[in-house]
Amino acid sequence: MPLSTIADASVFDRDGFTFRPLAVPSRGSVELAIWALEIAPGAVSEAHSMDREEVFVVVSGTVSATVAGLEVQAGDGDAIIIPAGAQLRIRNASSVSPATLTAVTSAGMNATVGEATFCPPWTQ
């Protein structure tokens, strides 16, 4: 399938984070997993890690993240690079405006939150 539209993407909501898979195995991609992500104003993720490298490109807004203990802030056009296995906590730095991002990783990525390891449904 050479075209994957955001209008046809499934929607996964988790604690102020909305994921819309664009290029994932269920939508025709073999090697990559790419999704659109919207973070509600003030939303903060759980601390977690992934078993593959992940990159977030900020489309709009300001995003703060703690990556392996290092605090970073990213705005429009910036990329946050998360090495495989690094602990991540990401948040919308604004309490009034949503932030939008594009996320890129490898198909088949697994996430670990606390003691639970799973393949996020928006990457399948």
Image (cartoon, grey):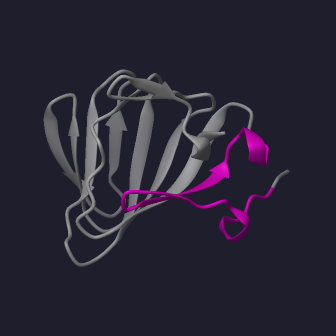
Q: How many marks?
A: 0
Residue 82's image quarter?
top left
Q: Residue at x 76, y 43 (%)?
A: 26
Across and down, in percent, residue 101 comes to 43, 58
Whether 77 is drawn above or below 55: the answer is below
Q: Residue lying furthest front in this view?
A: 115
Whether 45 is drawn above or below 113: the answer is below
Q: Residue at x 30, y 48 (%)?
A: 45
- Would residue 9 be counted in the magenta stretch? yes
Q: Which residues are magenta?
A: 3-28
Left or right of 26, for residue 114: left
Across and down, in percent, residue 52 comes to 47, 25
Left or right of 15, for residue 37: right
- Would residue 59 be counted in the magenta stretch? no
Whether 84 is drawn above or below 13: the answer is above
Q: Quick one: 123 or 75, which is closer to the camera?
A: 123
Residue 31's image quarter?
top right
Image quadrant where one finds the C terminus: top right
Q: Residue lying furthest bottom in this view?
A: 96
Left or right of 16, for residue 65: left
Across and down, in percent, residue 42 comes to 23, 65
Left or right of 88, for residue 69: left
Q: Residue at x 60, y 61 (%)?
A: 11
Across and down, in percent, residue 102 comes to 48, 54
Q: Residue at x 54, y 39 (%)?
A: 120
